[in-house]
Image (cartoon, rainbow, N blue to C red):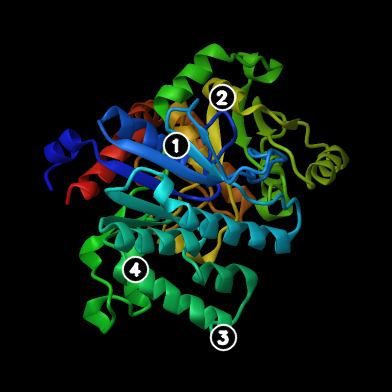
């Protein structure tokens, strides 16, 4: 089907992801952002999500209804009733199955889809997209944001020979084989498929021609609106005599922010300050360490509302991309904060290096070692002193932000819809 035909027919597209939500309700906005621009381009999207909003206390259905339509956002949402689960892993698993089973049971209550997109991390959404495509005789797109079950093996230490893991590998193979199109947020996904012998050239059943890459991104329209309408004042950011390197994100052990303290030591007595916005159970310990070691040029600013983040980032001099390196990073990465950094149009310092890294390759900043604070500090000092390169980074990041704008990423998705 040609793209013009798709527009003329106003194709109905189902977007299935249990934890998705519109931006006014939380952070998991990828499906909403796709839906927003699909709608502008003449499609009829509907996003299906669980009624219990992930990582919050919000329950969207409190009256026992099976589902609830929500049309206040840029993309229409249908929340499927699921139980509250809090910190309970058992109840969370129950909620996962509730969402997918209940959506399956009430599928006929909604306009028949012309295409169904099911988004992992959980495999159930991806599998359900394929099942729905067969039921409704339409096309399916499986979107993979986490490489399950390999992520369980690498991150949680499960053996590949574990019976449950072996079953999940077979489910993964079935998904990749039976989806009409595959969308991966990591650029090196084809490497993963080949290394695991899943592609046809290596005896597998997966056609690499249907594997595509659409990274995470940023809704530039929303970012600029939030930046302009929600100014955030901070005395350090407002001080013209300070060079501020800003990090936003969680302050937990897994984030290894102690490394930023180690780097900050090498800037003692200078005008370079490291400012950290975010909360987590490591904050108190790290603040204590900074006090005890006399590291006065790093400051923990605490929580900032989501709508204030664009203003904070846009006032920084440099932005710091930092997260724990895991084995699967070699296939690429897509942290949401990076795309906010792009939108802020500031030079980026990253300590995450891999084949598919996005900072050095796009010439928007530098990559420093993640295990050598002295060398990292030298490279940062060198960057700060090179005004010519800084100007180049600023010019490049403005273009890269457009590249990862959801208005453009949705065009890539639309090209698959019309294949």
**Marks 2 and 3: which is nearer the front?**
3
- Judged left or right of residue 347, residue 257 is right
Q: Nearer the viewer, residue 63 or 39?
A: 63
Q: Do the residues labelled 4 and 1 touch (CB within 8 Å)?
A: no
Mark before the other along the chain sequence, 2 or 4: 4
**Which mark is on residue 65?**
none
- In space, the residues marked 2 and 3 are separated at their CA atoms by 49 Å
Q: Is residue 417 above or below residue 328?
A: above
The residue at which mark 3 appears reads as: 163
Q: Which of marks 2 and 4 is in front?
A: 4
Label 3, secondary structure: give it: helix
Q: Name the residue under label 2.
A: 316
> In the rendered view, would you say 400 is above or below 130?
above
Q: Which residue is drawn at 58% across and 62% down?
A: 97
Foreground disc of the pair 1, 2: 1
Q: Could you classify mark 4 by the number of other residues whose Cα lies within 10 Å: few (under 14), some (14-19), or many (20 or more)?
A: many
Q: Mark 4 points at which residue?
A: 176
Q: How far apart are marks 4 and 3 (CA)?
A: 20 Å
Q: Residue 79: x percent and y percent? A: 54, 42
- Answer with the quarter of the image where residue 127 lies: bottom left
Mark earlier in primary sequence (2, 3): 3
Q: Are marks 1 and 2 in contact (CB under 8 Å)?
A: no
Precedes in sequence: disc 4 or disc 1 = 1
């Amino acid at each position: 089907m040609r793209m013009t035909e798709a527009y003329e027919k106003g194709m109905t597209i189902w977007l299935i992801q249990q934890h998705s939500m519109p931006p006014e309700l939380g952070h998991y906005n990828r499906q909403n952002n796709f839906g927003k621009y699909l709608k502008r381009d003449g499609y009829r999207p509907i996003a299906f999500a669980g009624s219990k909003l992930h990582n919050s206390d919000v329950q969207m259905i409190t009256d026992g209804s099976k589902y609830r339509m929500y049309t206040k956002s840029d993309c229409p949402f249908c929340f499927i009733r699921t139980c509250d689960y809090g910190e309970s892993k058992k109840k969370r698993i129950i909620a996962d199955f509730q969402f997918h089973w209940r959506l399956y049971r009430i599928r006929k209550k909604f306009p028949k889809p012309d295409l169904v997109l099911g988004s992992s991390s959980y495999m159930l959404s991806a599998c359900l997209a394929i099942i729905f495509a067969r039921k409704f005789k339409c096309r399916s797109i499986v979107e993979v944001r986490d490489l399950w079950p390999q992520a369980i093996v690498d991150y949680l230490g499960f053996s590949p020979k574990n019976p449950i893991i072996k079953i999940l590998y077979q489910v993964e193979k079935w998904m990749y084989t039976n989806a009409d199109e595959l969308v991966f947020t990591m650029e090196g996904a084809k490497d993963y498929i080949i290394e695991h012998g899943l592609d046809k050239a290596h005896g597998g059943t997966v056609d690499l021609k249907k594997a595509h890459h659409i990274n995470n991104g940023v809704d530039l329209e929303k970012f600029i609106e939030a930046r302009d309408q929600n100014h955030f004042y901070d005395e350090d950011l407002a001080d013209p005599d300070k060079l501020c390197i800003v990090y936003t994100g969680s302050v937990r052990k897994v984030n290894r922010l102690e490394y930023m303290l180690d780097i900050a030591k090498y800037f003692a007595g200078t005008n370079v300050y490291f400012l950290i916005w975010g909360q987590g159970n490591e904050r108190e310990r790290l603040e204590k360490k900074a006090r005890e070691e006399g590291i006065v040029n790093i400051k923990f600013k605490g929580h900032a509302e989501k709508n204030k983040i664009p203003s904070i980032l846009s006032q920084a001099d440099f932005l710091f991309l930092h997260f724990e390196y895991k084995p699967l990073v070699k296939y690429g990465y897509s942290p949401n904060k990076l795309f906010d950094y792009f939108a802020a149009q500031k030079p980026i310092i990253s300590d995450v290096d891999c084949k598919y890294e996005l900072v050095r390759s796009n010439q928007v900043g530098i990559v420093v070692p993640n295990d050598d604070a002295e060398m990292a500090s030298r490279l940062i000092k060198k960057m700060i002193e090179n005004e010519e390169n800084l100007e180049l980074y600023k010019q490049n990041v403005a273009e890269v932000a457009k590249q990862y704008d959801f208005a453009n990423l949705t065009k890539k998705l639309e090209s698959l819809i019309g294949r």
